[in-house]
Amino acid sequence: MNFVVENLTGMKALTDQVVAMDLLIAAKSGVRNYAFAVTEAGSPEIKEVLTKHLEEALDLHEQISNYMVERGWYHTFDTNEQINLNLQNINTALQLPTL
């Protein structure tokens, strides 16, 4: 979202939340892809390299998750709270003016 629209709508925090969620989804995808690749590795050397990348991807996912939890954007242990947050975000998005 551009700076002017963020200021007019007060959407800066939500924009940060959306970017963080996109990054989290990408990190999850990376974890899944590396895990799959490890199971398909043809040699112990390749498996070792892929396992190292998998561990790094898991660390990145944890860092992003912790960042989001600290800001109240991600409720990993409270499904009802996460659903409520998702509904709030949906309602906010529906209230945005169309440009």
Image: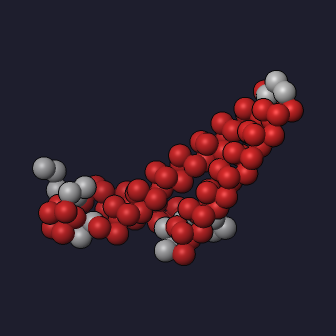
Answer above or below: position of 62 versus 34: below
Q: How many marks?
A: 0
Position of residue 62 measured from the top left corner of the image (x, y, whole percent):
64, 61
Q: Nearer the viewer, residue 44 or 7?
A: 44
Task: Tell which residue pokes out farthest to the front in this image.
Answer: 45
Position of residue 22 measured from the top left corner of the image (x, y, whole percent):
46, 51
Where is the N terminus found, in terms of image quarters? bottom left
- Left-right relation of 47 to 84: right
Task: Tell which residue pokes out farthest to the top in this image.
Answer: 42
Position of residue 24 measured from the top left corner of the image (x, y, whole percent):
54, 54
Q: Quadrant of residue 43?
A: top right
* Residue 70 in sight in this render: yes
Image point (41%, 56%), residue name? 19
Position of residue 77 measured from the top left corner of the image (x, y, whole percent):
67, 67
Image point (17%, 56%), residue name? 97
Q: Nearer the viewer, residue 4 or 37?
A: 37
Answer above or below: position of 4 versus 48: below
Image point (20%, 57%), residue name? 2
Q: How is the image coloured?
A: secondary structure
Image point (71%, 46%), residue name? 54
* Residue 9 in sight in this render: no
- Left-right relation of 66 to 44: left
Q: Quadrant of residue 38?
A: top right
- Left-right relation of 2 to 35: left
